[in-house]
Image: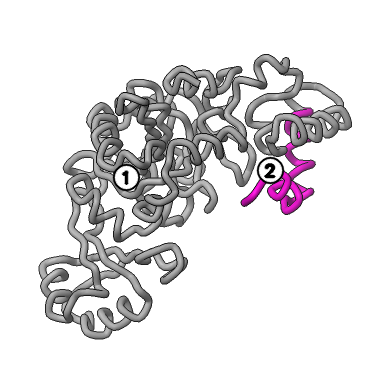
Amino acid sequence: MSSIFDRFELSSFQRLFHNAKAVHDYSGKPTLFILADMAKCILHDHIGYMEYNLFHFAGKPQKLRDTYVTFDYSQHLFKTLNDSGYLSLFNDKLAFNKIFKDYLGRGFLDVSEASPEEFVAFCKGKDRIFAKPNDSCSGKGIYRNFDIDEKTDLEELFGYLKDNHLFVEDSILQHEAMSSLHPSSINTVRITTVLDGNDEAHVMYALQRIGIGDMSVDNVGSGGIYTVLSEEGTIKNPCWSDKTITTYTKHPTTGMELIGFQVPCFKEALELCKKAAKVEKHIRYVGWDIAISDQGPIIVEGNPLPGYDMPQNYFVTNRDYGLKPAFEEILNQ
């Protein structure tokens, strides 16, 4: 994705007008004015129509608009804080597991280097394992649990994993409270950290992501919902759906009341991310996906290009300014 213009050109015009109507409904401003202002923001501020809606830019003075992390500034952080020569350590999920094995809270096996006997030994005593692609190219799109019982042909499964360049992990047993949010998915906390010039780790924000329906993942791009967590790890504002462009105070599938939910072991999760942030100091800007297991917080994955729209979404923050000054203060920019 080379620029904000690419994003706009490929975007759905139906969703463009849907967002413009949503802005009109809460701001009262004419739709034509909103569309013209959106176009201005695309050219001047380099944000798309969705961010225009999420950031409440309608009627917002330029002084406040300038406080937002935009596509360009997000790319600036990514390129200046993360050494491109080390990105493969995060993009290759198996390499990531090997580097951060002390923070995963689960075992894993590189099937490509394992013998059939080693795979059988790994599966012994387990009723489920989870498979991931070794890297972003091979095994693309294959993320799934495999149930194991006495009828499972482990030799056949081993061959399938090897042919598709997958490695396996122990399945995560999620904390009961986190499962209550949505029992079908691992509902992860995204905690983003930055290392400053003195190698001190700073938590920039934390998000709670939640699956809906029959989803087995909590990804927002797959239809999940999210919100920003308070400093104590509490849901205090509604959750947002990019798919429906609306907020929820109750879970749309289970009806569970979301406001007031407290993430278990949240303080420990923050400390875990601060420690992990210092393991590979060539990558200084990371969004950590944290699962709260029955044994405490564990790292699922690390993303060296965290999203910038979710933590600045007015609908889940109730805040009329962006995160750019917080980054600038920490990085002395």
Between 228 and 52, the residue placed more toward the observer is 52
Q: Is residue 187 magenta?
A: no
Identify residue type, mark 1: Ser
Dominant SS of magenta comes to helix
Q: Residue 82: which quarter of the image?
A: top left
Label 2: which secondary element: helix
Q: Where residue 146 appears, x then y in whole percent?
A: 29, 69
The numbered dot on residue 262 is: none
Q: Residues within 10 Å of mark 1 (few under 14, many from 20)?
A: some
Write the residue at 30% across / 54% down: 96
Q: Residue 309: which quarter of the image?
A: top right
Horizontal side of residue 6 vs 140, given as left or right: right
Q: Residues within 10 Å of mark 2 (few under 14, many from 20)?
A: some
Between 81 and 267, the residue placed more toward the observer is 81
Write the residue at 29% across / 30% down: 270
Write the residue at 52% across / 18% down: 325
Between 89 and 17, the residue placed more toward the observer is 89
Segment tinted magenta in the rendering: 1-24
Please name the residue that numbered disc 2 is placed on. Answer: 4
Point out the frontmost of discs 1 and 2.
2
Identify residue type, mark 2: Ile
Q: Distance between the Cα atoms at labels 1 and 2? A: 36 Å
Label 1: which secondary element: helix
Answer yes or no: is residue 178 visible. yes
Q: Where residue 221 appears, x then y in whole percent?
A: 54, 50
Please name the residue that numbered disc 1 is placed on. Answer: 179
Instruction: Give above or below for 331 relative to 306.
Output: above
Q: Where residue 172 appears, x then y in whole percent?
A: 25, 53
Q: Where residue 119 appears, x then y in whole percent?
A: 17, 74
